[in-house]
Structure formats: structure tokens, C-alpha cells
Image (tube, helix red, strand yellow):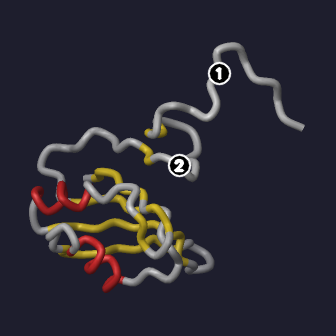
Amino acid sequence: NYAPAREGDVWPPRNSVITGGQAQSKGTKSMSEKPEGCMKLFIGNLSYDIDEDGIHKFFGNVDAEVKAVRWLHHRDTGDFKGVGFVEFWSTEACEKAASLNGKNLLGRPIRIDWTD
């Protein structure tokens, strides 16, 4: 059973950028405001097969040299959560890397956002 449409709803949505709620298979969630001097990015929706070498190659495609990668793991089980943080050597490299938001990495659209 589907909920009835509300007056004024348009489906499918015309906007390809998702600004809130859960990301869907189409479109890319917009990034937050960039902090001044930002050299670190949040990366999410990662394949569980990803490794540090894969991240270096992915961001190397836009000449963004990676300084460090930090993965997030579940506190109790130690399982990889599919998200992490990437630090770059310069703000320019960080901006180049951010341009890959929504691009496919190991078959999944990577979610990128600014962080400090």
C-alpha cells in the first residue's frame, strides 16, 4: 500500500541534489559549508572491500595527494562502519578530492563532506 500523494507533490523529484532526508539511488547529497583552511574530508557509503591503497588511487585520479586515512569501526565488535576520514597535504588537494562527491568507488557512490 502506498500513501496518497499530497497536493503539489511531483514525482520523481526534479532536483538531482538531495538536501535532506535519506539519500536515494539518484542524485548526490549536497555538502555542508567548507571550513576555512579545510584539509580533511569525511567519506561515507564505502564498500566493505575498500582499503587505504584504494583511497589513495581514487583521490589520485584528481591529483589529490592523501596524507592520512582513518577508518571508523564499531566500538564493541570492531566491524568497519563503511565510513572514515581522509586528510590531505593542502587545501587545494582537499578541494580537488571533494569534487569526487557522488562518484562511484567500488560500485558505490561515495559520500564526501567537509570536516575539521
| Residue at x 22% of width, y 72% of height | 61
Disc on the earlier residue, 2 or 1: 1
**Residue beneath the point at 10% across and 57% down:** 92
Give the residue drawn at x 45%, y 66%. Answer: 83
The disc placed on residue 86 is none
Residue type, numbered disc 2: Lys
Left or right of 21, for residue 40: left
**32 relative to 83, above or below:** above
Quarter of the rendering containing residue 112: bottom left
Q: Nearer the viewer, residue 3 or 92?
A: 3
The local secondary structure at tag 2 comes to loop
Above or below residue 64? Residue 15 is above
Image coordinates of residue 6 in percent, x first then y, are 73, 18
Report x, y in % for residue 74.
56, 72
Mark 2 vs mark 1, CA separation in Å? 18 Å
Of the pair 26 and 44, the residue shown nearer to us: 26
| Closer-to-camera residue (51/110) | 110
Q: Is residue 81 left or right of residue 11?
A: left
At a point 35% along the width and 59% down the height, the residue shown is 42
Q: Which residue is mark 2?
A: 26
Task: Give the class, few, some or many, for how many residues have Cα within 10 Å of label 2's Cα (few <14, many ≥20).
Answer: few
Query: Where is the N terminus found, in terms of image quarters?
Result: top right
User: How far from the left and from the top, in percent, is residue 26?
Assistant: 53, 49
Residue bearing the label numbered 1:
9
Q: Secondary structure at mark 1?
A: loop
Q: Which amino acid type is shown beneath numbered disc 1? A: Asp
Left or right: 13 as drawn, with respect to 58: right
